[in-house]
Image (cartoon, helix red, strand yellow):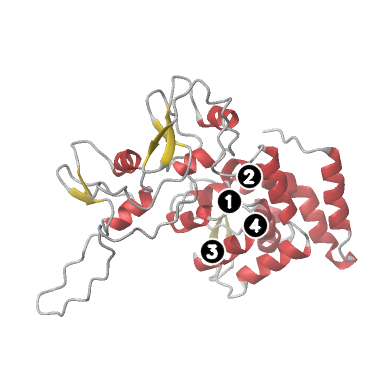
């Protein structure tokens, strides 16, 4: 991906960084060296460039840690069970822990984005505004990215001391971003826009893919995959529902339950009713990634009740009834 950043933007960016005190020279150099990578990853994945840069600087000692120098690992990402690449042993919480090793810093930045995108515990972060670096910093800490109690405040201080939030705006402007509800009328002139559960969607045509749709609709590359619980690399084909806005937390009134058909997946049902996939799992008290059996009855609006063991007092069930007015804000989607 080639960024279309005006030269004057780069000049002002460097000028802002050079205004920092001389004892922070290594950090200034780090940001000047890797800010383009962070912007590219924000466009691709939706993770604020400011957060990526602050984490990279903090976790790698501004690129000077042993992991960064010997393994190009700028984010302190450990091996975990799903890693099949090269590794390096390093003392962290315990001695000789397994960390990922990369061929390049670019690979480290990309894997950091994929790591956060691919784990359910970080999914809530992508519901935040792309400029909410404080929400991201606190969310990363709460989700367990780091054990330090001061992790969030450390990230926020780095971002604000070095004005890293400017890179978030550069990334957004580079895609012609106009907000998550923006839809280009010229690009969709030949498409029928439909609505389900107050969420706009289109039906894909032969040859459609996420990069081409993102370009046509003036979306960032991460938006449409995120709205549809997919990845930017998933193939689409023709005849597929693609939502242009975030799905809802529950189905519209009148759709209380769904009887699972043979071969039907949770993803299929999520797309059918425009309900977020993780929320559908939550409503039905199911572990994320499991699939229902044919004939199962799934809840679409109210969470499945958990039966109390015999002999125990029932907890009061405080729920909003269908007859009560929904207190759900319509954000114009």
* Nearer to the camera, 173 or 49: 173
Q: Tag 4: Cα neighbours inside 10 Å, few (<14), some, or many (≥20)? A: many
Report how many numbered discs are placed on residues in the image: 4
* Nearer to the camera, 131 or 109: 131
Q: In front: mark 4 or mark 1?
A: 4
Determine the CA span between mark 1 and mark 3: 16 Å
The mark found on residue 139 in the picture is 3
Determine the CA span between mark 4 and mark 2: 11 Å
Q: What is the residue that sits farthest to the left in this orientation?
A: 310
The reply to whether dot 1 and dot 2 touch (C-beta < 8 Å) is yes
Q: Secondary structure at mark 2?
A: helix
**Which mark is first along the chain, 3 or 1?**
1
Residue indicated by mark 1:
112
Residue indicated by mark 2:
41
235 in relation to 259, above or below = above
**Which mark is first along the chain, 2 or 4?**
2
Residue indicated by mark 4:
51
Q: In front: mark 1 or mark 3?
A: 3
């Amino acid at each position: 991906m080639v960024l279309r950043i005006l030269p004057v933007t780069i000049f002002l960016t460097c000028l802002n960084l050079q205004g920092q005190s001389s004892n922070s020279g290594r950090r200034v150099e780090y940001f000047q060296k890797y800010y383009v990578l962070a912007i590219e990853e924000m466009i691709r994945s939706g993770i604020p460039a400011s957060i990526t840069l602050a984490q990279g600087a903090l976790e790698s000692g501004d690129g000077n840690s042993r992991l960064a120098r010997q393994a190009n690992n700028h984010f302190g990402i450990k091996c975990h069970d799903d890693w099949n690449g090269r590794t390096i042993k390093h003392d962290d919480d315990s001695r000789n822990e397994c960390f990922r090793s990369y061929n390049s810093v670019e690979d480290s930045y990309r894997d950091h984005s994929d790591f956060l995108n691919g784990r359910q515990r970080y999914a809530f972060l992508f519901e935040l505004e792309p400029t909410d670096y404080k929400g991201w910093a606190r969310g990363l800490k709460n989700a367990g990215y780091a054990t330090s109690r001061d992790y969030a405040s450390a990230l926020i201080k780095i971002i604000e001391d070095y004005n890293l939030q400017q890179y978030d705006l550069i990334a957004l402007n580079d895609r012609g971003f106009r907000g998550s509800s923006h839809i280009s009328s010229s690009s969709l002139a030949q498409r029928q826009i439909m609505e389900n559960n107050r969420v706009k969607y289109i039906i894909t045509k032969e040859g459609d893919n996420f990069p081409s749709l993102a370009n046509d609709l003036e979306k960032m590359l991460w938006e449409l995959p995120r709205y549809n619980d997919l990845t930017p690399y998933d193939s689409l084909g023709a005849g597929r529902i693609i939502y242009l806005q975030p799905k809802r937390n529950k189905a519209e009134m009148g759709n209380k339950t769904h009887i699972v058909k043979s071969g039907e997946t949770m993803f299929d049902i999520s797309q059918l009713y425009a309900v977020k996939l993780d929320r559908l799992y939550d409503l039905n008290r199911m572990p994320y990634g499991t699939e229902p059996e044919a004939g199962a009855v799934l809840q679409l609006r109210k969470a499945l009740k958990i039966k109390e063991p015999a002999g125990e007092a029932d907890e009061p069930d405080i729920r909003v009834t269908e007859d009560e007015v929904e207190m759900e804000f319509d954000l114009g989607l």
